[in-house]
Image (tube, rainbow, N blue to C red):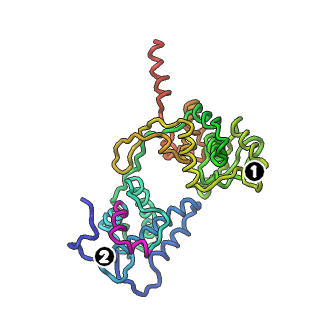
Amino acid sequence: MLFKINSRALRFPQWIRAKRKSPRDFDSYFDSFLLSRDIGDGRRRHYEVLRRMIHRYESFCRLSHRQKSCRFNFRSADRAFIESFSDYVRNEYLYVAEYPEILKENPEQRKIVPRGKNYLNALLKQLRAFFRWARESRIVEVSPFEGFKIPSEQYGTPVFLSIDEVLRIYHADLSEDHRLSVQKDIFVFQCNVGCRVGDLVRLKKSDVVNGSLEYIPTKTIKENTRTVVVPLNRVAREIVQRYSSYPGDRLLPFVSPASYNRYIKKLLKVSGVTYLVTRLDTLSRTERKQPFNEVASSHLARRTFIGNLYRQVRDPDLISEMTGHVVGSQAFTRYRGIDVQMKRELVAILDEK
């Protein structure tokens, strides 16, 4: 049963209290926590998402209990707080509809939508890291997460484009739509180098050295400063050459990530890559079949690079050298889908006996 913070039967939670003068509050300690961690900009942005979530949760508690003012008293947080906060994260889209003042007090650019278990678990791990720091810093005596096990994220089998499908997209005639044609080249380039979209947008002409793309992934730059080197194949070299005279030092004329994702969906549709794929619905945890073009995004290019290389060499450590993953990373295992072609090759061994 979900813990409902807005139930009239519940008393005002101990971890939310009326504001009063204090030398430090949650935000101040959270700033200190972030300063203590040697993390990149990408991970820092994820923690800022958590901070904003805490503030919206504060507003919800105040509004649902008809209090004039209150704040998050993390020193009083216990297991009931974890259950309460988890309920808010899962059902925030309902709560902001019931209490529109939440978003008025805490403007949010992203639309509040239903969230699955993976999102919640990732958020709880970040919050657990804050409480671990607070305990080690002797700011709190006990973390509410002690004895609380956060489930591991669950992912479906990754889907990716075949080499033939990438070439079909590359050779598609888009002469009547220049913008789509440009984004097509960028997407195909990403499929052939495997970088994250965050690195793709910042690539410069100087990042191509002796026929290879060289860069340090921004997501893990604090934890792992290894330079990723990806030799450019023929298609990637053609694309780089095509935009070599593009003004400025940017390697490719990238648009915003949101627009890029829309172009990718359109690219697959006009290229005929619209067959159904089986996906794991992160909300219902059931399988769902959708047209490939509808589920495509910039991360598809990264999966495509990894998936097609793994078909050939099946050596995750070698491939991770060109993707920026830490060798042996658990995250990397999500990309190593054993696809139908590989299974056919295995079954064909039986025919040879």
Extreme residue in the top direction: 353
Q: Picture coordinates of residue 63 (x, y %)? A: 33, 76
Q: Is residue 74 visible?
A: no
In front of the other: label 1 or label 2? 1
The residue under label 1 is 205
Q: Quadrant of residue 77?
A: bottom left
Badge 1: how crowded within 10 Å, few (<14), some, or many (20+)? some
Question: Would residue 195 appear left or right of 80 to someone viewing this image?
Answer: right
Q: Picture coordinates of residue 33 (x, y %)? A: 51, 69
Q: Quadrant of the N terminus?
A: bottom left
Q: Residue at x 38, y 46 (%)?
A: 281
Question: Would residue 321 appear left or right of 75 to someone viewing this image?
Answer: right
Extreme residue in the left direction: 9
Q: Secondary structure at mark 2?
A: loop
Q: Residue at x 79, y 49 (%)?
A: 245
Q: Which numbered marker is on residue 14?
A: 2
Q: Which residues are magenta?
A: 90-105
Q: Nearer the viewer, residue 279 or 43?
A: 279
Distance Cα–Cα, label 1 vs label 2: 56 Å
Q: Residue at x 48, y 32 (%)?
A: 339
Residue 103 forms part of the magenta stretch: yes
Q: Picture coordinates of residue 143 (x, y %)? A: 38, 67
